[in-house]
Image (cartoon, rainbow, N blue to C red):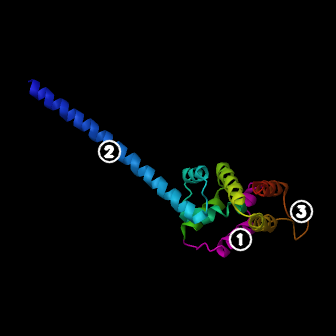
Amino acid sequence: MSDGLNDRGKALEGAFFQQKDQELLIRLRQELETEEVKVALSQSSGIVDESLLNQLVELEIEPASFASFALLPLVEVAWADGKMQSSERDAILSAAESGGIQKESVEMEVLDGWLQQPPSAELFEVWKVYAATLSGSLSEEQAKELRDDIMGRARSVAEAAGGILGFGNKVSDEETEVLDKLSAAFSR
């Protein structure tokens, strides 16, 4: 009887460790996948800041969707007043096209989702950290060029739906507030 109990004990012990091994293998796979995504994201974006890469991965920003992440400032400006105007949408799609985003791509799918529903405030906060980090890693001239490019495209979106028949204030107070936040993200 003691042999039967001993055998059962060993079987239970084996099953326990097999389950623990499975759990550890699953966790290891997840960690490796996360690390692979971070490496690929770093290569495609130039980001080396580990904390920022972790935030991007947590928000499920992957290398394939990173191009749309670069258009987030334009989307934020368009949603500033709580609605997406068709002229703002057209301006964003034009920017996406000129940036090389293909119509049937993952990037366009992500962007299209943002055109339907505003992205989370958390995502915009991560973008601001990204902009500050990237700006800090560039020369002063390169950082100015980057800021001017993004701000110019964002201002174009803000002006796309502004005014009535070309008269009046082209940029709303809400859009101006978002533009100020964008500009501040590039401060050194």
Taking the spot 40% from the left edge, 51% from the top edge, the residue there is: 29
Residue 136 on image: x %, y % = 71, 57
Residue 139 on image: x %, y % = 74, 64
Is any part of residue 92 visible from this angle? Answer: yes
Is any part of residue 109 visible from this angle? Answer: no
Taking the spot 75% from the left edge, 59% from the top edge, the residue there is: 77
Residue behind mark 3: 169
Please name the amino acid that badge 3 sits on: Asn
Question: Which mark is first along the chain, 3 or 2?
Answer: 2
Query: Distance between the Cα atoms at labels 2 and 1?
Result: 50 Å
Give the class, few, some or many, for how many residues have Cα within 10 Å of label 3's Cα (few <14, many ≥20): few
| Mark drawn on residue 90 | 1
Query: Distance between the Cα atoms at labels 1 and 3?
Result: 20 Å
Q: Secondary structure at mark 3?
A: loop
Q: Nearer the viewer, mark 2 or mark 3?
A: 2
Give the class, few, some or many, for how many residues have Cα within 10 Å of label 1's Cα (few <14, many ≥20): few
Q: For residue 134, what is the image quadrant? A: bottom right
Which residue is nearer to you in this view: 85 or 100?
A: 100
Residue 110 on image: x %, y % = 58, 62
Which residue is nearer to you in this view: 81 or 3?
A: 3
Residue 16 on image: x %, y % = 27, 36
Which residue is nearer to you in this view: 23 or 82?
A: 23
**Numbered circles on residues, count:** 3
| Mark drawn on residue 22 | 2
Question: Which mark is first along the chain, 3 or 1?
Answer: 1
Q: Is residue 31 left or right of residue 81?
A: left
Magenta-colored span: 76-104
Vertical position of residue 156 compared to residue 29: above or below: below
